[in-house]
Amino acid sequence: MSGFKNPYDPNIKLSSGCGCGGHSTQAEHDAAAESARFDSGSEALQSRVVESAVMRALFPQDELRRRFLRAVGAGTALSAISTLFPLGMAKEAFAQVGKLEKQSVKIGFIPITCATPIIMSLPMGFYSRQGLNVDVVKTAGWAVIRDKTLNKEYDAAHMLSPMPLAISLGAGSNPIPYVVPAIENINGQAITLSVKHKDKRDPKQWKGFKFAVPFDYSMHNYLLRYYLAEHGLDPDRDVQIRSVPPPEMVANLRADNIDGFLAPDPVNQRAVYDGVGFIHMLTKEMWEGHPCCAFAASKEFITNNPNTYRALLRAIVDATAFAAKPENRKQIAEAIAPANFLNQPVTVVEQVLTGSYADGLGNVLKVPNRIDFDPFPWNSFAVWIMTQMKRWGQIKGNIDYAKVAREVFLATDAAKMMKEAGLKPPATTSKKFSVMGKEFDPAKPDDYIASFAIKRA
């Protein structure tokens, strides 16, 4: 409590470094206030913070405050100020700042490595450090994730990054505002083919193939369609693409129900481990640093539970920063491999996270960023996703791409938490990038769509 000076003492001078006058800088003030919120014995400190802020507001010139207190005394001053300003209400309001509206939270997830930050935050303590009691619920598929989140059975969810955009735009249903405060992973997907197709590495040989993707509104669907179209195949006419939940993909490949899939890991690596498939290519070879999955919630949830939302986001971003360090990957693999999470052999998960893996063709490759972790939800990612939704007829009409991207991909919130976690957020929210050698300019989305020969738009 010594850091906060008594504002009713005429013999001390309140510092001008922060809003309450108790710290040399605003950063020190914020750190102390954050600590106070989680300190059960901090009521006196909280009162001092409020009283100091009020006194500084009433007496911008500190010398005037000191002269006033010498003239009337601290007790009289407190009584007089209390009649003019509701100190009790202010103190009560301050005490509520940072208090979790919901301490117990449910988050749905699909058992794939894209959900690494959401999953690992439970066994590795990232949620509990924020005072949260989180139940991470393994879920069968993306349609179930969507429905349970919309029905408020889940407070937040591990979603494919296009899903909150589709929900917000009302693609296939009524629009409901959803947000992406953080990207869960970048890269981390692959095209895997059945072992019987080892001699068919040229996509032009894939006419008539049956492919699986996790969901219609997924990076997997858009990247597979993009890849096929760039090789002259119409994804709606020359092949079949069906939605299959990731946990069922390897079994479908083994049963010869499909010829291959563009899937999240560890599905690709498990196909190799089981001897039923080989990795044709990693999606990072199409687009280095592409987004895949996201931490998502409804706009209603984050509006009604701002402190719980911030605590969740802080835990996710902290976990993402930890996962971004290669030296932590083996520890994470052990934490998320068990049956209640990924239900995979540790060696399968390690191969994905470390990037040292067998490809099913007799090679052991080393690709450290096969999967990587960067929470920043670039608005330009959202714009690209919407161009593909429009390209393939999932959305129609005029779209204000930039506006929707800003409203759904919350780059500002992510940047703030990244700074707190010791990460360096980008200085801008949009950037150009290339997909299979073709540049994407987020300022010209309709020109980009028009440039493709194969499209439904």
Image (spheres, grey):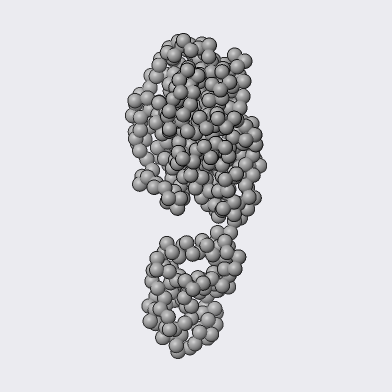
Q: Residue at x 62, y 20 (%)?
A: 251
In the picture, residue 437 is in which quadrant?
top left
List x then y, in percent, for residue 34.
51, 61
Q: Nearer the viewer, residue 287 or 125?
A: 125
Q: Nearer the viewer, residue 260 or 61?
A: 260
Residue 362 to residue 165: above or below: above
Residue 164 visible in the picture: no
Q: Quadrant of the C terminus?
A: top left
Q: Residue at x 52, y 62 (%)?
A: 35
List x then y, in percent, for residue 90.
55, 69
Residue 381 visible in the picture: yes
In the picture as drawn, the residue positioned furthest to the bottom comes out as: 71
Q: Nearer the viewer, residue 439 or 415?
A: 415
Q: Is residue 405 left or right of residue 256?
A: left
Q: Residue at x 62, y 15 (%)?
A: 255
In the picture, residue 109 is in which quadrant?
top right
List x then y, in percent, for residue 124.
57, 45
Residue 333 to residue 301: above or below: above
Q: How many marks?
A: 0
Q: Residue at x 43, y 50 (%)?
A: 422
List x then y, in percent, for residue 102.
62, 53
